[in-house]
Image (tube, rainbow, N blue to C red):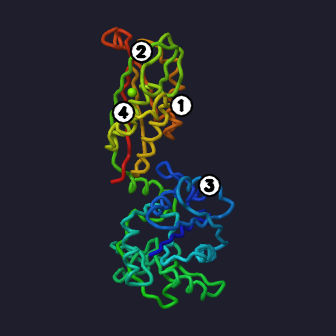
Amino acid sequence: MKTAALVMAAGRGERAGAESPKQYRALIGRPVLRWSLAALAGRIDRVVAVIDPEWRAAAGAAAEGLAVELVAGGDTRTASVRAGLEALAADAPDVVLIHDAARPGLTGTTIAALLAALEGAPAAAPALRVDDALKRVDGQGAVVGEAQRDGVRRVQTPQAFRYAAIKAAYEALPEDATYEDDLAVARAAGHAIALVPGDLKLMKLTHAEDFAIMEQLMAGVACVGSGFDAHRFGPGDHVTLCGVKIAHTKGVVGHSDADVGWHALTDAILGAIGAGDIGAHFPPSDARWKGAASEIFLAHARDLVSEAGGRIVHVDLTLVCEAPKIAPHREAMRAKTAEVLGLPMARVSVKATTTEKMGFAGREEGLAAQAVATVEMPR
Ligand code: MG
């Protein structure tokens, strides 16, 4: 079965009350649009974001690194869906999921349920029961009556369709027709609809306060990892610590650039996601890593976190040595680390201590580092 998804992101979203449309605003550190794209990419063969061309740069940034095509939408949602369906036509899929970018809480569970449902029906969507009492109100908000909640469902997106069925249903619409959603278009064409369990996390970001609710619904579990590393001093005229080259009367012996700070930090991040240690990923026996910049190791750990669906929240590093002096370089080290990890400076701590002349660091035989990394992982 060939699958495709259209993520509708061409709207202006004025109700959420900000300068940029809500699909490009940050939600837990990522643009809203990216959450849906990331959930679909890898599970769906072809993912298309239907966008307002004026916001192409923001859409491109939100899709960075994901296999996502950008297609220009139209003036109305209906026109945008038509444009998206048309873009798929040359290499038509068997099924298409049509999703609102403003619903970032999409999971693999919902996607799998929809694809399974399409085996028995031409259309499917996630839906929730209505458990609250429903009242009718007048223009002033005064209650004027009851509304039936029995036999009512709250329908979310993605709404999933056999491609040929929804394409034909849209083609049959009058040019100026407006429908509540894509299911209504399918139903107008006479197609049966299967409902699958909805998900509270699929709530639509509509009002400004919805962002705070969504962040709570999507919050993951904090996982904390620790790392430690030490290297021996040897001949040389500099040391590299947290990517910063510091002139010194000695060098550091090591297979790579022997950056103890970033080695300890790499191990802390790997520890937080249970992904082994730096030696398992970059064996010292492998000639490729001789003299390598430790940024490669740190960036690899960072990428493993995002591949696992997590994100690094905070890192804290302590360097242990009598010399060189760390304080003059501390801010540069924080900045370099923040840059590689994609974190704001406030989430990167670099500290230094001596061991009061005791032990190997005290005798200036070498230097050491310990690190703690906090990573938020999906529940
Ligand atoms: Mg090391």
Instruction: Identify the mark nearer the N-term, 4 or 2.
Output: 2
Q: Residue at x 53, y 25 (%)?
A: 244
Task: Choose mark 2 or mark 1, whichever is in front.
Answer: 2
Q: Which residue is mark 1?
A: 335
* Of the pair 248 and 115, the residue shown nearer to us: 248
Give left or right: position of 128 versus 298.
Answer: left
- SS for callout 4: strand
Spatial CA distance of label 3 from label 4 is: 33 Å
Instruction: Identify the mark nearer the N-term, 3 or 1.
Output: 3
Say the numbered circle drawn on residue 372: 4
| Amino acid carrying mark 1 in the image | Ala
- SS for callout 1: helix
| Amino acid carrying mark 3 in the image | Ala
* Of the pair 138 and 104, the residue shown nearer to us: 104
Say the numbered circle drawn on residue 233: 2
Q: Is residue 115 above or below residue 107?
A: below
| Amino acid carrying mark 2 in the image | Phe
- SS for callout 3: helix
| Amino acid carrying mark 4 in the image | Val
Q: Residues within 10 Å of mark 1 (few under 14, many from 20)?
A: many
Q: Is residue 262 visible?
A: yes
Spatial CA distance of label 4 from label 2 is: 24 Å
Instruction: Identify the mark nearer the N-term, 1 or 4.
Output: 1
Spatial CA distance of label 1 from label 4 is: 17 Å
